[in-house]
Image (cartoon, rainbow, N blue to C red):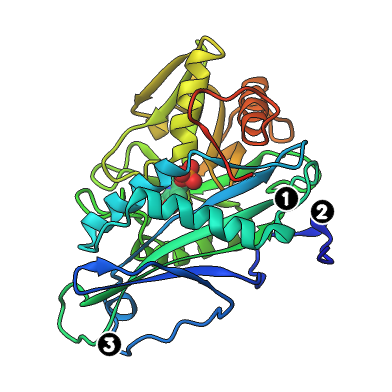
Amino acid sequence: MVDIKWEELGFSYIKTPYRYISYWKDGAWDEGKLTEDNMIHINEGSTALHYGQEAFEGLKAYRTKEGGINLFRPEQNAKRLNRSAERMMMPEVPQDKFIDALKEVVLANEEYVPPYGTGATLYLRPFLIGVGPNIGVNPAPEYIFSIFCMPVGPYFKGGMAPTNFIVSEYDRAAPHGTGAAKVGGNYASSLLPGQEAHDRNFSDCIYLDPATHTKIEEVGSANFFAISKDNQFVTPTSPSILPSITKYSLLQLAEERFGMEAVEGDVYIDKLDDYVEAGACGTAAVISPIAGIQNGDNFHVFYSETEVGPVTKKLYDELVGIQYGDVEAPAGWIEKVK
Ligand SMILES: *Cc1c(COP(=O)(O)O)cnc(C)c1O
């Protein structure tokens, strides 16, 4: 066994033995293969380096109580990668190739899939980059699709805890830009707003809709949800939000399992009193309860600054239970690696 203190893991790079890499050239993907080499040797003119022609994904492998390994809705990641690829003028990665490669990477690095009960998971990072000789602003002549992985710790060491967020003056994405694509450019431009939020002791920033700055769009690199006074699960809708698979899963669970009304609509920043709980959701964040939101001089507290609201808690338990195989999953949500 590898010598890792699973309970102490954070979210940082660890070199695992194997990653998958496949090359696209002259209109076709090669077979792809596992490699031990964690360095990529690419042309200096690669579009990924200069013009941000790239897209990525993030998902986790979960160790079950019985020692199996689950992936959570990986076909949704395949579909989203291909939507990002289309927007960035990159070739599609066939869904079967994507899922087979994920499984290959997980199994090859099986020792690094954290044991059940530690709260840790194996994080998988698929990415697609434009490479090859180029200098003009054009789609690349060649592409690389790769997946690497590493064990990551539970998002909340010592239990789920609400934290504070601050409304950013910056926009994450333009009204008709690339907000809905999972691409590096959105992240490069979010580094400064994120740093400014951290400098003021907030967990991250809240981005408002770029056209009117009146509605909540995203919470850093996670989606936003809130529970209304009349027990609705509400999450913003906008073409510049990144469509979170966790968010769509929660919308469905709220409705089907908890009898809530699931609403994709507008969440106005000056109407936060309508909501009794709020949170951020995503693969990395899982569900992160939001204690309060600072908007200019106004600080709005939702449920409590120290305690997790009951609806947030039950949604978290249901989602995580499904991912680890402890709670029955809706049909097709779990892809068994073993
Ligand atoms: C990846 C991502 C999310 C979360 O999506 P999941 O599919 O739930 O992991 C949310 N917002 C942004 C900006 C993202 O890049």
- Measuring 74% from the left and 52% from the top, which residue is drawn there? 114
Residue that badge 1 annotates: 120
Which residue is located at x 20 percent, y 85 percent? 134
Instruction: Give the alpha-carbon distance from disc 3 to disc 2, as whole Å.
Output: 42 Å
Quadrant in the picture for the N terminus = bottom right
Q: Earlier in the sequence, mark 3 or mark 2?
A: 2
Q: How many marks?
A: 3
Residue 168 in view in this figure = no
Q: In the visual, does 106 lie left or right of 49?
A: right
| Cα–Cα span, label 3 and label 1 | 38 Å
Task: Give the residue number, with chain letter if any, for mark 2.
Answer: 7
Residue lying at 29% horizontally and 46% vertically, measured from the top left: 240
Splitting the image into 4 quarters, where does residue 43 fall?
A: bottom left
Give yes or no for contact between labels 1 and 2 (Cβ–Cβ under 8 Å). Answer: yes
* Secondary structure of residue under mark 3: loop
Task: Say which label, 3 or 1, has the lower sequence index.
Answer: 3
Name the spot of residue 249 as percent of width and height, x first. 48, 30
Q: Residue at x 72, y 60 (%)?
A: 112
The residue at label 1 has a CB less than 8 Å from ligand 1: no
Which comes before the other along the chain, label 1 or label 2?
2
**Within 10 angstroms of label 3, few (less than 14), some, or many (20 or more) residues?**
some
Q: Give the residue type that dot 1 points to.
A: Ala
Is residue 57 at least partly visible in the picture?
Answer: yes
Secondary structure of residue under mark 1 = loop
Circle on res. 45: 3
Kindly give the residue lying farthest to the front in the view shown. Answer: 31
* Three-letter code, disc 3: Gly
Indicate the secondary structure of the residue bearing disc 2: helix
